[in-house]
Amino acid sequence: MLIMEMWAPRKLSSSLWTQIICTEEGWSPTPKCIRQCFFPWVENGHSASSGQTHQEGDTVQIVCDTGYSLLYNQSSIRCAESGWSTPPKCSQRDPKGKCDPPPPIDNGDITSFPLPAYAPGSSVEYQCQDFYTLQGNRTIICRNGQWSKPPKCLDACVVSEEVMEKHNIQLRWRHEKKFYSKTGDNIEFICKAGYHKKSPAHAFRVTCWEGKVMYPTCV
C-alpha cells in the first residue's frame, strides 16, 4: 500500500497536510484543496461574519441598510469554488424602481435581446444550453430596482470510453464511445465480457447529478 502526504496552500485549505492512499481504482480520497473566502466589512449593511474567513460551501447572511440591497435582491451569499457567489456589497436601489440588464447565468441565457434598463414589473425568461437542466423559476421579475433570483443550469454528465475501460464496464443500452446525459437521468452499466461485478448490484444503475456520475467497478 502506498500512502502519500499532500500539502495545500493555507489560503486554499485550513488543513496543511492530508494523507491519501493508492488503491486499485486510483487515489482515495481524490485530493482536493478547499477554497476559503474572506468576508470583508459590508458597505451600507452589516453581517455577523464581517472580518471572518469561510470555507467553500458556507453561507453568510447579510442585512442591508434601508434603501439598499444585495445583487439580485438576495439575503445571503455563498462561498463557492470561484469565490463569493455574488459581491458582498449592498447597493442603493433605483428610486424609480428600474432594473439593470438581467444577470448572466452559466450555460444559459435570456430568450430576448437585453435592454439598457427595465421598468418595474418587467420580466425576462431564461433557457439553458443543450443537455443542461434548468433549476428554479424560468422567469425573473423586476421589483424595486432588483431582479428576482435567476435560475441555474445544472451540468450535464459525460460518460466516455476511457473512464468505462478503467472500470471494466460498458453502457447497457448504448454503443457510442461518448454520450451526454441530463441531470436526473438514469445511466445503466454492465460488466464487460469476462469480468464480474465488484461493486454492489444497485451501483450499476446511477443517476446523473450536476455533471457527476458514480462509476461501478468490475474485476
Image: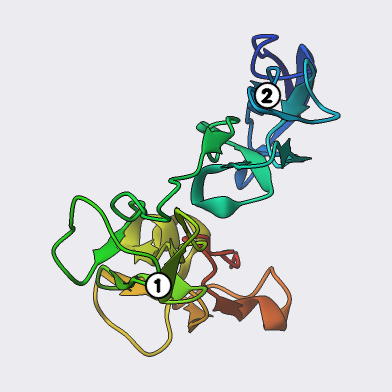
Name the element at disc 2. loop
Q: Is residue 56 left or right of residue 134?
A: right
Q: Residues within 10 Å of mark 1 (few under 14, many from 20)?
A: some
* Coordinates of residue 37 in the picture (x, y in percent): 65, 24
Labels in figure, total: 2
Check the picture and name the quadrant holding the N terminus.
top right
Give residue 48's quadrant in the image.
Answer: top right
The residue positioned farthest toward the left in the image shown:
113
* Coordinates of residue 157 in the picture (x, y in percent): 41, 65
Residue 19 visible within the image: yes
Check the picture and name the quadrant holding the C terminus.
bottom right
Residue type, label 1:
Gly
Q: How is the image coloured?
A: rainbow
Circle on res. 121: 1
Residue 2 visible within the image: no
Give residue 179's quadrant in the image.
Answer: bottom left
Residue under the image location 52 percent in, 60 percent down? 212
Name the element at disc 1. loop
* Coordinates of residue 16 in the picture (x, y in percent): 77, 11
Q: Is residue 30 left or right of residue 185?
A: right
Residue under the image location 73 percent in, 39 percent down? 62
Closest to the observer, 145 or 54: 145
Question: Where does label 2 land, which residue?
Answer: 42
Residue type, label 2:
Val
Closest to the observer, 197 or 42: 42
Q: Is residue 204 left or right of residue 186?
A: right
Q: Viewer-nearest of labels 2 and 1?
A: 1
